[in-house]
Each structure stands twice: as C-alpha cells, then as structure tokens.
Image (spheres, rainbow, N blue to C red):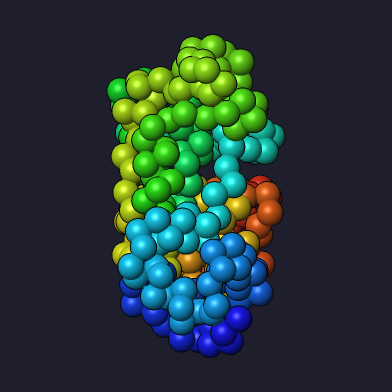
Amino acid sequence: MAYDYEYFKREIFSMTKIDLNSYKEKQMKRRIDTLITKHGIKGYDEYVKALKTNTEYFDEFINYITINVSEFYRNPDQWKLLDEQVIPELIKKYGKRLRIWSAACSTGDEPYSLVMALSKHIPLDQIKITATDLDKQVIAKAKMGLYNSKSIAAVPPEFKKKYFTQVGPSFKIADEIKARVEFKEHNLLKDAYFSECNMIVCRNVLIYFTEEAKDDVFRKFYKSLSKGGILFIGSTEQIINYREMGYERKSSFFYEKP
C-alpha cells in the first residue's frame, strides 16, 4: 500500500473539491483503504489514476466516503419537541412561510420528515425546504423517494398511512411531500452558505469532521440564521463553546440565534 496519502488528498481536492483534511484521518483512510484493497489496487497513486479513468470507481468512491446513515424521525423525542415547541415558536416569529435548510440531508429522510412535521401546523402548499448534500448519488436517491421498512420505522402511524405506498419490499413517499423539497449539491466545507434561515437542520454529520472544521461550520450556520432562528443538531453532537459563538441553548439539541 502506497503511503503518500497527502498526495492522494491533494488529487481528490483537485478532482472533486472535497477537502479530506477536514475529515478525521484515521476513519477516512480506513474507508479508502478498504476500497483500494477491494479492487486489488497497489496504492494511492494507482487509485487516483483509476478514479480519473473509471466512472464506476469514481462514483463508488464518492458514495463510499460520504456518510449516508439516515432514517425518518431519527430520535423521536427530539421531533416531539420540534413539533410541540419549536415549530409553533417559529411560526409565531416569522409566519407560516418559513425558510428552512436541511444541510447534509443524505437520502432525503430528514427533509421529508421536516415536511411531514410542518404539515401539522402549515398547509403543505406553503412549505418549502431547501435540502443539500455533497453527494449527487444520494440526492438522486432522495429524489427517487424509495425507502426500506427500517428507514421509516419511526414515522408516526398517521403519516406512514397517508404518505407512503408499499412497492415490493420498499416504501415510496408521496409526490405531494417530495414536491415541497428542493435538493441542491452543496459542500459545507467549501461552498457559500444560505442567508436569513429561520431554521437549519444538520444532524449526525459533523461527528466525522475535525474539531476545527466542526467549529467553522457551526459559526457559519450562526451567520446563516435570521435573528431568532434555530439550529437543530443530532443526538451524537454538541456545541461546546456555543455561548462564545453567540448561540443560546434552547434544549440539548436546539440552539437559538438571539
């Protein structure tokens, strides 16, 4: 196995604008080494050549290094708090046409969950979620809207009945929910952020980033929020220095820009 991982990181950034320096090296190298071994490739330099010439290898690489573990209504207690407290407060502040960004949305489970949660408070045709991810393959999966039974296990029964149709072993989400989400490619570590968001949802993604990259993203989210806006993070995460950034902590996973 070639040892020149620094060369590999530079080449990947040149090809994809994905900065592997911002990911925890031990975890990322392990994932990449698994792919290299799988294809019987001798090292990083040879793997770079393969990625440049083999579309299947390239697509597999992008899909494999981006973390796509997602499910609807993940951590239901947090969604209950969102439903009972956070959404009503946001509507009181901003009205029903909320600006919501689902960042690093993976296969769409989260933004679609948001649409369903909001539909209890706002007519569907007034809901719009901007959902972004680095990986165009998972965005394609999100737009398809097909999920397995495990992914939708925590969906409230009334929504499961109303908005999902079984197709073989899978479940297809209704077009009326899909229509409320606009998917875009976006790199949290490189691209410009949206502005005046009433709520940003980014859950269980930043745990894979270095502390420096994580800190930078949370600061950028703060700037992206409107005054009184809410950041909703995952149960695996916390913002240690949230006060220094300017946030107020509403609860364990909800932070407000005062």
49 left or right of 215 in image:
left
Front position in the image: 50 or 231: 50
Q: Residue at 41%, 70% (x, y): give it.
A: 50
Q: Image height check: is 224 above or below 25?
A: above
The N terminus lies in quadrant = bottom right
Between 238 and 74, the residue placed more toward the observer is 74
- How many numbered circles does the render carry? 0
Quarter assignment of residue 81: top right
Residue 34 x %, y %: 62, 65
Q: Position of residue 148 (x, y in %)?
A: 57, 28
- Nearest the viewer among 76 and 229 is 76
Q: Position of residue 172 (x, y in %)?
A: 46, 22
Q: Position of residue 166 (x, y in %)?
A: 51, 15
Q: Which residue does the image show at 32% across and 49% down from the upper left?
A: 184
User: Does the image show residue 60?
Assistant: yes
Quarter-wise, where is residue 24 in the image? bottom right
The residue at 33%/67% (across/down) is: 53
Instruction: Give the farthest residue toward the front.
Output: 40
In this picture, residue 54 sits left or right of residue 108: left
> Do we see residue 209 in this rendering?
no
At 40% across and 48% down in the image, what residue appears? 137
Judge whether 42 appears above or below 171 on screen.
below
